[in-house]
Amino acid sequence: MNIIKLAWKNLISKPLSMLLNLLLFGLGVGLVVFLLLINFQVNQNFEKNLAGIDLVVGAKGSPMQMILCNMYHIDAPTGNIPVKDIVHYFNPKHPVIKQAVPLSLGDNYRSYRIVGTDTSFLGLYNAKIAEGKIWYADYDVVIGSLVAEKEGLELGDQFYSSHGLVDDGINVHDHGQKFKVTGILQPSQTVADQLILCNTPTIWAVHDHEEGDHAEGTHEEHDHADHDEHNHEDHAGHDHDAHNHAGHDHDSHKEHDTHDHAGHDHSTSPKNTASTFQLQDHPDEFITSLLVKFRGRGIQALNFPRAINEQTDMMAAQPAWQINRVRDMMGSGTDMLRLLAMAIIFVSGISLFISLFSSLRGRKYELAILRVMGGSRKTLFSLIILEGLILAVLGYLLGIALGHFGVSVLGGQLEASYKYSFSPWIWLTEEYYILGVLLVLGFVASLIPAIKASRTAISETLGEG
Amino acid sequence: MSFPDMAIAQGEHCLILGTSGTGKTTLLHLLSGLLSPKKGSIHIKDTAIEKMSESALDAFRGKHIGIVFQVPHFVAALTVSENLQLAQKLPGNKVDKIKIKQILDQLHLGHKLDAYPSNLSQGEKQRASIARAIINGPAVIFADEPTSALDDKNTTEVTALLQQTAVENKATLIIVTHDNRLKAAFENKIILADI
């Protein structure tokens, strides 16, 4: 029976008062820890997904929306941009642009976005193939690790996509061709984990089917002429008129040369394979955006976004800059919550002070008896301080548990909207600082009661009977 | 308030009698070091306790002085046994659960080892406080009106217990009281005069 055990026994002999103090501490600390964990991981998410991208080029609209849509995949696109306006960005001799990665959005599978792009996309996010291989033909898809895990997709699995970016269960393309999983990515802890990747023509093809609204519904048997006709309908005035479907000889459309236009079979002679497709060859098509990496940060690179914004119908935005704006906006919200949390912790300190202080009145005989039994003033002082510290430490532990539990519960909900999985199993240095803060708070709150306890007048108290 | 000189030999039993207002409790608190005298000296075990530092006196009291109060108080959150363990631990002695069991058995409280003080009867509480007073084998046992709350039967029993345990522990027993029922049991009496 030592003094720590005595302090503990004293605390648990008043369970309701102890519970109240623990809940207050736990709530305050839990809220702070929750905010720290979410904030840390959101920032981490933003950082990782910056992926060295210097510029995003897309349709005019909100630059922040464009960044969120095309880099974080959490907002709707601002529109489409014509390929003919961006073809020159793919020129390997471009003075500013080192790399340009096209993105085409518009479809999803169970709310996982299907992104039409080229293979350089994987390099941006350092995503490597874990199983299978990169897409080869149209409708081949490589899926992110999380998509595979959550939807239980395996190599060779096939599925229909849904129109739009969120699965509403209505707009399922339950006709036309199915997507086929040819590859699964290793986890990269980036947004690539949550995407379904395919080549750009696949996205065009899906929407040609969609917009063409075929009455006969036998899309598998469509020959290439049909596709081209749809394109004609969609984009009036483009130069596909030059196609001669009865044995044309078209230099620019290399992939067409290999096709048998009278009823070819997609599975044996795919068009738009990774090696033959060139975006530049389809100037009349549209894509959603272009992710751009610069060669350097010279004056030309600095002026480049403004040139696009002022001289073209497209919009260019710098991710780092837009993300700072998002952080600022989010920051003011979390600042308010953090203030609230600190207020709760402060009130916990006051509550601890009050419950210790008011407990002294009822315990004065006990405290006097402790002196009679051989305890010193120091013993009484330490006893009260220990009671305060034990409550603070337990409240801290409860708070840590609540904070991490909160992330594991709410993280799932946030995951859907942020396209990022929040882990409750990370530990931040700040959490140790909070322990320090709580120890100081517990000490300060119990200081005055402890001094009062140590000054208990034993003779007077015991003389009262 | 002043008191006459008095000397009580080691192992002697003594009754200090006085009506209310004669400063009986004050005297007992002085003798046990709970109060320090403005003038004069108090010697226990050849030590002048008024000259000791406060914390040294606390430890000395815990080790060598047992006190039984009129109203017994305990640490409410601890069981009888734990209260006694604390009484051993606080002045720096080792916890000895066998001794605790022995003493409680001796006072017919063995079955209340794990009971909380609030579940004891008045007589049981008084016996438990005697157990606490003698747990460290004190040189002197002070009792302040130990029987004022007890009926005749319990008074006789508690008085006998105090005398018996004092003898067994070779301790000096000093009882401060106005309870005339105790007179017959003690040869040695000091009567405090009204102030």
Image (cartoon, rainbow, N blue to C red):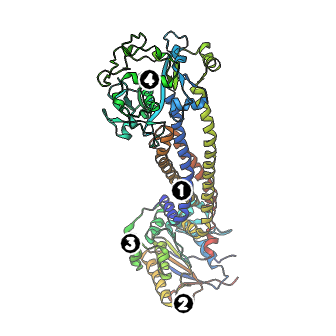
Q: Nearer the viewer, residue A223 or A50?
A: A223
Q: Quadrant of residue A379?
A: bottom right
Q: Is residue B147 left or right of residue A141?
A: right
Q: Nearer the viewer, mark 2 or mark 3?
A: 3
Residue picked out by circle 3 = B101
Q: Amino acid at mark 1?
A: Leu
x then y, percent, for residue A397: 49, 51
Q: Nearer the viewer, mark 2 or mark 4?
A: 4
Residue picked out by circle 4 = A229
Q: Secondary structure at mark 2?
A: helix
Label 1 in the same subunit as label 2: no
Q: Secondary structure at mark 1?
A: helix
Q: Secondary structure at mark 3?
A: helix
Gap between marks 3 and 4 measured at Cα: 102 Å
The answer to whether residue A202 is seen in the rendering is yes
Label 2 in the same subunit as label 4: no
Contact between labelled residues 4 and 2, with CB atoms less than 8 Å apart: no
Residue A319 higher or lower than B121, as above or below: above
First reached walking from the N terminus: tag 2 or tag 3: 3
